[in-house]
């Protein structure tokens, strides 16, 4: 069996980023979203699990690069559990930034740092059921309590997009009244504290180390902030590669705002895993 094919980025900046990663992997950072990127999107987020090949691909790649970090809106401990990352050989230096960087888990120590949520979170938790009833939430709408944020999902409703729009104004007002903000995603509105996003989380992580090339892979609107962080680095002359995990198991189209800015579009978590495996094979062969 030959070496897995490494797909070429479609943009000059992406090709430069990939070349820099391959030339100096010890300085490179591999940064990845979880849901829709390492784990397939499923109707019930509690049932999400990493793609069957994800841990093996990461375990092969991680020892060959500077850092691997998972950046997710989920609680860090949940991402670790659903990803199967704890005690995985080769992932001893993995970092998981949960709740958009508010939480942090280090594989090397197994330690989780998770500060107390701001008071507005508890207030919204109490007020959210009545707000949804008042707004006329469609049957099938349900709330994911993330501890520091709330995802109001409409994927299970008869018309997910119409159900989402039905709630947008009311939830935005509720969040603002308690010092939170609303961030939209694919059939979800997330109410969370302001000033935290995947871009700030990634930038803070990169500031801790002399990072070279940065690869970031994501699939939804929440990943645009991380894209912007990599684009800012590129404007400063630092190489980066933006990957879009496109589509889901039920045939949804990619998030166009993300796909349009990506250097490389791959077919969902299976495509992300294939990319990671191909990178690991290329770097291993070059040693």
Image (cartoon, rainbow, N blue to C red):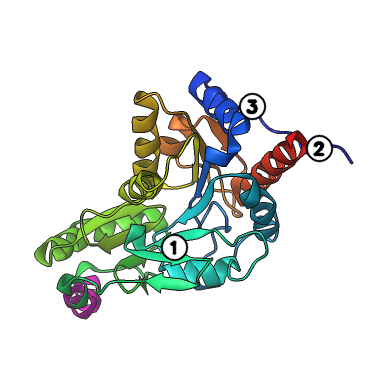
Crowd tier of the residue under label 2, counting other residues whose Cα lies within 10 Å: few below 14, some 14–19, many 20 or above: few
Q: In which quarter of the image is the C terminus?
A: top right
Residue 49: x and y in percent read: 59, 66
Does residue 205 appear left or right of residue 5 in this picture? left
Residue 163 visible in the snapshot: no
Q: How far apart are marks 2 and 1 (CA)?
A: 45 Å
Residue 173 visible in the snapshot: yes
Above or below, 132 against 9 in this view is: below
Nearer the N terminus, badge 3 or badge 2? 2
The residue sitting at 44% across, 66% down in the picture is: 105
Point out the residue furthest to the left here: 177
Point out the residue furthest to the top here: 12
Q: Mark 2 points at which residue?
A: 3
Above or below, 174 against 256 in this view is: below
CB contact under 8 Å: marks 2 and 1: no
Q: What stretch is highlighted in magenta?
A: 123-132
Nearer the N terminus, badge 1 or badge 3? 3
Crowd tier of the residue under label 1, counting other residues whose Cα lies within 10 Å: few below 14, some 14–19, many 20 or above: few
Q: Mark 3 points at which residue?
A: 8
Nearer the N terminus, badge 2 or badge 1? 2
């Amino acid at each position: 069996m030959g070496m897995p094919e490494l797909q070429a980025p479609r943009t000059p900046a992406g090709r430069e980023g990939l070349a820099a990663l391959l030339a100096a992997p010890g300085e490179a950072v591999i940064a990845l979203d979880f849901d829709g990127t390492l784990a397939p999107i499923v109707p019930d987020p509690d049932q999400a699990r990493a793609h069957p090949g994800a841990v093996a691909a990461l375990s092969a790649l991680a020892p060959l690069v500077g850092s691997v970090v998972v950046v997710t809106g989920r609680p860090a401990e949940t991402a670790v559990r659903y990803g199967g990352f704890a005690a995985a050989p080769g992932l001893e230096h993995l970092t998981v930034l949960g709740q958009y960087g508010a939480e942090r888990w280090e594989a090397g120590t197994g330690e989780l740092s998770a500060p107390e949520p701001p008071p507005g979170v508890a207030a919204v938790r109490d007020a959210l059921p009545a707000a949804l009833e008042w707004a006329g939430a469609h049957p099938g709408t349900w709330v994911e309590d993330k501890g520091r944020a709330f995802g109001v999902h409409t994927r299970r409703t008869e018309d997910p997009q119409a159900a989402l729009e039905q709630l947008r104004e009311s939830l935005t007002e509720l969040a603002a009244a308690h010092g939170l903000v609303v961030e939209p995603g694919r059939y979800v509105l997330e109410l969370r504290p302001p000033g935290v996003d995947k871009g700030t989380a990634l930038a803070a992580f990169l500031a801790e180390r002399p990072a070279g090339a940065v690869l970031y892979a994501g699939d939804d609107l929440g990943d645009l902030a991380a894209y912007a962080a990599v684009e800012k680095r590129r404007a400063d002359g630092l190489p980066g590669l933006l990957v879009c995990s496109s589509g889901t198991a039920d045939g949804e189209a990619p998030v166009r705002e993300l796909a349009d800015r990506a250097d490389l579009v791959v077919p969902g978590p299976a495509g992300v895993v294939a990319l990671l495996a191909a990178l690991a094979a290329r770097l291993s062969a070059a040693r």
